Image: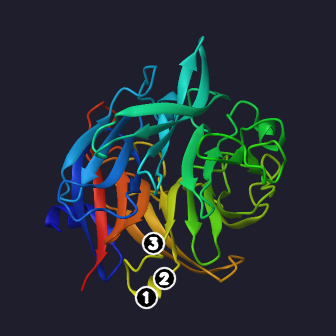
Amino acid sequence: MTDDVNSRWWVFPGFEIEVIATGLDLPANICFVPEPKDDPLAPLLYVNELYGQVKVITVDFSVHSYAEGLLNYQPDHKFPGTGESGMTGIVVEPESGDLFLSMIYEKDGKMFSKIIRTSSLTGLKLDSMSTIIDDIPSIRAAHQIQALTIGFDGKLYVNLGDGMIDSSTAQNDNELRGKVLRMDLDGSIPTDNPMPGSYVYAKGFRNPFGARWRKSDGALYISDNGPNTDDRVAKVVPGGNYGWPMSMRQNSIMWWNHCQAPTAIDFMQGGQFPDEYNDELFVALFGPAYALGRDPKGKKIIKIALNEDATAVKGYDEFVYYKGDGPASCCGLQFGPDGLYFTDLHGETNGKGKKANGNVYRIRAVE
C-alpha cells in the first residue's frame, strides 16, 4: 500500500488498499479462477474491458492479453449514453476453465445481445470460441445484457436489461429483455425452468448490472438500476416478478431513494475478511459518469448486513470511497482468495479522453 493510494481512496478501519494492475481500458467486471494454481504465471483473474478486450492477471499480478477485438462495431466513448455499451458479463466455468462473456453486436444495422464461450489450453490466450445464444434485440446504450453467473446447480444465469426503449418488455413473457435467464452451458433450455420451454427464470428488471450467489441460502442476488430513484438489491426466486416498469421496490430487499448506480456485488463468504464480516454483501456504487473527485452519489463500495432470510437490512456502512480529484468510479467487484478486488472504470486521469488508465485494486484486512 502506498501513500498515493491512501490519498485517493478511503477504506474502512482495519483494512488496507493497494493497486495490483493498471493501464486497463474501461475495466468493467472481474472474475476469479475458482482454484488458482500455485504458479506465478498461472491465471488468477480475468478482467473484461468494456470495448471488447479481455485481460488475464496471473498469480504474480502480471497482466496478459487473453482476447482482443471481440466487438464488431466501434464504440463512441459517450458516458452516459451509447459509450456505455459493449462487453459486460464474465464468468469462469469451474470444471473446464472456459470463459463465458456477454456483449452486444451489430447485424444488418441493428444491435443484438449474445453470449460466447471461449476456451484456452493455458488460460492465458484464447484458442477457440463459440456462440451459445444470440439474436436477442438490444440497443447501443445501457440496459443491455449484463452479469453472467454459474449457479450452484451448474446452470448459466444471465441478467438482461429491458432495452431502454420499451420498458414493458420486462413484463412480456415472450421477451427475454428485462429478465434473469437460466440455461444449460451449451445454451439449451433446462427442462425444469419455471416456464416450460422458456429461458425466463424471473422477470420485471430494468437494468440489472450485478449478480452473485449466496452460499448460506443458495440464492441469487442482483443489483438493479432505477430510473430517477429506487436503485435496488433483490433476492431472485424462480418465477419471481420484480415489478418493473410498475415498481422498482416489488420483492426488493432494499433500495436507494437517490440513484447511486449499483454495479457489481459479492458476499464475503470465503474467509477473506474477519469472521464478523461473514455473509455481508458488498456493492459497488458507480455514481455519475466522469464526475471528478468525491461525489454524494456513488464512487464507493458499501457493505450491507442482511438477516438470515434476506428480508431485512441489519447494517449499512461505507466501506471504500474515492476522495481523489479524478473520475475514478467503482465498477467491477469480486472476492478473490486473499481479499476484495475492484475496478475503477475510468481510472484516475483519463477524464473524457480515450486513454487506458483503469485500475484493479485489492482490499485486505490489516493483521
- Kindly identify the residue that appears in the image at 43 percent across and 88 percent down: 275
For mark 1, what is the residue?
275
- Kindly identify the residue that appears in the image at 58 percent across and 16 percent down: 107
Looking at numbered disc 3 in the image, what kind of residue is underneath it? Glu
**Mark 1 vs mark 3: in front:** 1
Q: Is residue 204 visible?
A: no
Which image quarter: residue 321?
bottom left
The picture places residue 117, in percent across and down from the top left corner, at: 49, 38
Q: Are marks 1 and 2 in contact (CB under 8 Å)?
A: yes
Give the Cα separation between the discs numbered 1 and 2. Answer: 5 Å
Looking at numbered disc 1 in the image, what kind of residue is underneath it? Asp
For mark 3, what is the residue?
318
* Other residues around mark 1 within 10 Å, as few (<14) / some (14–19) / many (≥20): few
For mark 2, what is the residue?
278
Q: How is the image coloured?
A: rainbow
The picture places residue 129, in percent across and down from the top left corner, at: 44, 32
Q: Is residue 187 above or below residue 35?
A: above
Q: Describe the element under mark 2 as helix, strand or loop.
A: loop
